[in-house]
Amino acid sequence: MYLRTSPARIRTTIGGVHRARAAVALVVVALVAAGCSSSGDADPGPTATTPSTDGPTSSTQLVDPDAASVVTQTATLGGVDLTLTVGPVAVADGVGILRVAAAPTGGEGAVDLSERFGLSWTAGDTIDAVRLVDLPDGRVYLPAMDAEGASIGSEGNTYLRPGDGSETFFVAFAAPTAGSVSVMVPGVALFDAVPVLDAADAPSVAPLTDLTSVPAAKLTLASPALDSFTQDVAGQVSTRVADDVTVAIDSDVLFATASASLSPEADGALVSAGDQLARFPVGTMRVVGHTDDVGDAAENQVLSEQRAQAVTDRLGQLVDLSAYSVTVEGMGATQPVAEGTSDEARALNRRVELVIEASAPGEATSTVVADLPPAQGPEAAGSDGVSIVQPRDGQTELTWDVKLDHVRRVDGAIVGDVQLTNTGTEAAYSVTAFGGTTWDARGEGSASLITGATKLTLLSGGMRLYPLDYVIDDSLYNVDGSGREPLADRQLPPVEAGETIIVTVVWPDVPGDTVVLDSATVTTESGLTGDFGPAFRLTGVPVVG
């Protein structure tokens, strides 16, 4: 998977879940309101959007960018064929401004780029769903915002038809530190190796003063670290890689009630956990036991210590721990990770944590050889695709074809552009085929992601890998708990009958030259289980690059 340049602190949890939060660089963006569009691109709409009067209008003389400073790709959106030219990113005063140009080249109908490339819950008509991604550094850059929650970018004609001229848009971000970044354009692709230039060397890019009257020092800038989340295919072991890494193992597999004796089934879970730890082969490790709140506090303290010791002893027999400096301790019931006294909450609180500090994760490898679990829905080769059904309460069900011809290995990550085709007879205005819940795959409340691609996973080496994701400060969201977003398209647009859209997803790296894409019943990081959209599986998807 992607590598961070800073030391990694690993926290492994056995028998429960540790809710770790990655540190967010600078200040994170504000989410003003969650909502869904109720109209598709076929709506006639205005031919232009009135520019904002809150900030200065552009008076800068811009020139066409040099070919070496842009990345170009074609796409069809809302029936309109477009050529998209992305880049460069021009840096000045701690702010990087991205240039994106869209030129209609054919097709029919019309497309509203503020709907396709913008977020419904933010103010203004900027293309603020676009993100900058630095995969080698494990970081994503989100559009800058002012104190009112408006994204900083140009507002112009976003409604394009065949025959219209090219339109150019600008979006501001925290200045990237690398010489190039990837640019994630929803519904199109992850554009690789987009140059980052000094503003003096990028005369095609509008300066910040053309986009807002707010000085750079007063903007809200966000560049959160990327995390990864994986589970074993049995749903017993999960691993969170962030500033902390959490490996959680089903407590029922490890111990009987009030016992510190490992069950016969524990070895399989411990071997799987050890395989995850093998990616961090040198460091210090604290093995920390935790219990629920049932029983006497003193007895729970002793039990937590005994369980931590039992895990340490057996793990050391199954996995070579000689490179670690290991200590053992117990915390009793003093550090619960789940509130309440329900059976589910108490099961999460019964756990053992392996807290490791290591220099950096290793290459994506797996010593586990595991058969794939049975598919929970239709299964076919990625290039052939499958047909799925999206139920709707009180309405005609939606039908879709799903394909994935290949994925790309980019800077230590796997990037897939999934094709989703509406095979029904009517437009789909709420596309929940790849999500379909107000909870994301980690069990966090996230109403804004109900039409996002949160549940598309890869299967590899006995593990299920979710899309890379990142944490945003919850206090800046109107929806409680909406603090995590996937490195995948977050709002799938309305899709007309017969239309195909592209859904881009970025996963941690996996070994091998093929992958399996699986959409199945999900057990979230907080223990919530659900279907989260139709199940399906695509096999034998080639890895290129």
Image (cartoon, helix red, strand yellow):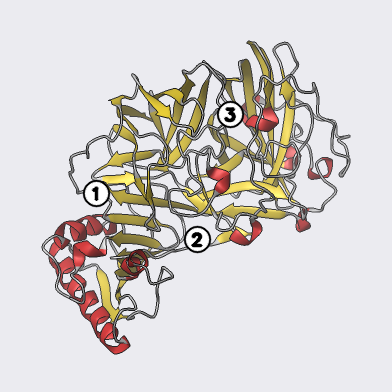
Is the C terminus in the top left, top right, bottom left or bottom right quadrant? Answer: top left
* Label ID, residue 22: 2
* Label ID, residue 429: 3
Q: Pick out the residue farthest to the front.
A: 394
The picture places residue 302, in percent across and down from the top left corner, at 25, 85
Q: Which of 391 and 119 is in front in this view?
A: 391
State which mark lies toward you, 2 or 3: 3
x 33%, y 36%: residue = 518
Element class at badge 2: loop
x 46%, y 18%: residue = 423
Q: Is residue 333 above or below residue 496?
A: below
Q: Residues within 10 Å of mark 2 (few under 14, many from 20)?
A: some
Q: Earlier in the sequence, mark 2 or mark 3?
A: 2
Q: How crowded is mark 1: few (under 14 residues within 10 Å), some or many (20 or more)?
A: few
x 22%, y 63%: residue = 252
Q: What residue type is labelled 3?
A: Tyr
Q: Is residue 87 above or below residue 3?
A: above
